């Protein structure tokens, strides 16, 4: 557990650094408000945490591509003859 937690946190933080930073700030505010019994700071921290979760969800929804039914692009014309391609050779030239 101790080995996995830093790896998971590091990968999550690197994927979305802005929403992760907002999440950390909100969590610190919520903990400080809860420990110090300052309920306005606690509620503000919870609001910031929920805002960062909504922001991360919105970013993941925005990144998903829309599936379309297009024909695949052909970059080479269909071969009309059955002749093979010429071999590539490296000829040394002397000057």
Image (cartoon, helix red, strand yellow):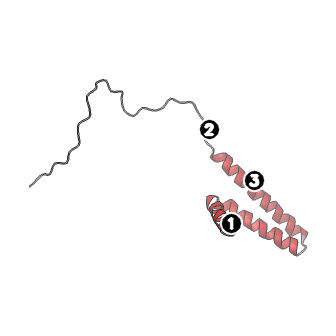
Query: Which residue is the site of mark 3?
Result: 54
On the rendered structure, is 17 left or right of 25? left
- For marks 1 and 3, the one nearer the N-term is 1
| Circle nearer the viewer, 1 or 3 | 1
- Quadrant placement of the C terminus: bottom left
Residue under the point 25% across and 28% down: 83
Per the image, label 1 sits on a secondary structure element best described as helix
For the N terminus, the image quarter is bottom right
Which label's residue is closer to the chain start, 3 or 2? 3
**Residue 86 location, quadrant:** top left
Q: In the rendered image of this protein, does residue 16 appear above or below residue 28?
A: above
* Residue highlighted by disc 1: 5
Q: Residues within 10 Å of mark 3 (few under 14, many from 20)?
A: few
- The CA span between labels 3 and 2 is 21 Å
Residue 58 location in percent, x, y? 71, 50
Badge nearest the viewer, 1 or 2: 1
Residue farthest to the bottom, as pictured: 36
Residue 36 % position (x, y) = 88, 76
Q: Is 78 situated left or right of 85 in this image?
A: right
| Residue ID at (86%, 67%) | 42
Q: Earlier in the sequence, mark 1 or mark 2?
A: 1
Which residue is tagged 2? 66
Asked whether disc 3 touches disc 2, contact meaning CB atoms under 8 Å apart, the reply is no
Q: Quick one: SS at disc 3?
A: helix
Q: Is residue 54 left or right of residue 83?
A: right
Choose between 47 and 68: the one closer to the eye.
Answer: 68
What residue sits 74% from the left and 63% below the top?
23
Question: Where residue 34 sits in the image (x, y, percent)?
Answer: 87, 71
- Packing grade of label 1 (10 A; few <14, some 14-19, many >=20) is few
């Amino acid at each position: 557990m101790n080995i996995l937690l830093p790896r998971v946190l590091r990968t999550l933080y690197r994927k979305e650094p802005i929403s992760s930073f907002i999440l950390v700030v909100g969590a610190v505010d919520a903990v400080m408000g809860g420990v110090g019994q300052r309920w306005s700071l606690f509620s503000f921290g919870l609001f910031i945490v929920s805002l960062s979760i909504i922001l991360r969800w919105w970013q993941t929804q925005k990144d998903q591509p829309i599936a379309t039914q297009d024909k695949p692009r052909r970059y080479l014309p269909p071969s009309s003859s059955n002749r093979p391609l010429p071999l590539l050779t490296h000829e040394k030239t002397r000057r």
